[in-house]
Image (spheres, grey):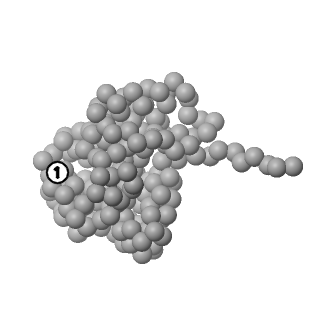
Amino acid sequence: MSFGSDNCRTLVLTSPSYKEGKSTTTVNLAISMVQDEKKVLIIDANVRKPTIHHMFKIKNEIGLTNVLSGQATLEETINQSEFAGLDVLTSGPIPLNTEALFYSELIEQFHEKEKDEYDLVLIDAPPVLEEKDTKIIAKQSDGVILVFRNGKTVDLLALEAKNMLELSNANLLGVILNAKNRWKII
């Protein structure tokens, strides 16, 4: 199964806890995919602690929460990045009840529109052990990638995150280990 194939077009990137590099990993993966001439959409689904808009230096006044609550369309909320073929959907205003938002009927229509427009949709989700939203989002995607940070991610929490995703019937595709020290050859 390859990214952007018909089987795997919507991927969630998550981690056990905050500060493990999932947003940076999401952006780097997206950039590498557009260099391979794929049309990619990044969605910041971390609606309580969004960061993607900072990374692209765009405003976060309207975004995912507006689309899922029916206040705006996908077309009205998409931001073009400086990379050709890479669009960004910021999180939007922080809602009162995020779980209800991700369980809404609009989410299925939203996913269908995404798949029509993009080869690959990368969803930067909250840490799976910190927020319930991630289990909901992960179950609705084609696959999930766990991001671990070398020297930070505790083995027990990594295992707990994996188990939680499996219990929620998410399709766990694999793990990315970042911040790995490089070996010096003397």
Residue 32 in percent (x, y) is at 49, 63
Secondary structure under tag 1 reads helix
Residue identifier under label 1: 108
Residue at the top extreme, as displayed? 156
The residue closer to the viewer here, 88 or 140, is 140
Residue at the left extreme, as displayed? 105
Classify 12 as above or below 115: above
**Disc 1 residue crowd, few under 14, some 14–19, many 20+, Cα 10 Å:** some
**Residue in the picture at 24% in, 39% down:** 99
The amino acid at mark 1 is Glu
Classify 4 as above or below 136: below
Residue at the front extreme, as displayed? 1
Q: Would you identify the image quadrant in which residue 6 lies?
A: bottom left
Report if residue 83 is visible in the image: yes
Report if residue 55 is visible in the image: no
Q: Would you identify the image quadrant in which residue 87 lies?
A: bottom left
Q: Is residue 19 left or right of residue 48?
A: right
**Residue in the picture at 25% in, 67% down:** 117
Classify 159 as above or below 9: above
Residue 17 in percent (x, y) is at 47, 36
Residue 127 in percent (x, y) is at 42, 39
**Residue in the picture at 55% in, 27% down:** 155
The residue closer to the viewer here, 95 or 155, is 155
Classify 79 as above or below 28: below
Label count reads 1
**Residue in the picture at 42% in, 31% down:** 162
Residue 16 in percent (x, y) is at 46, 35
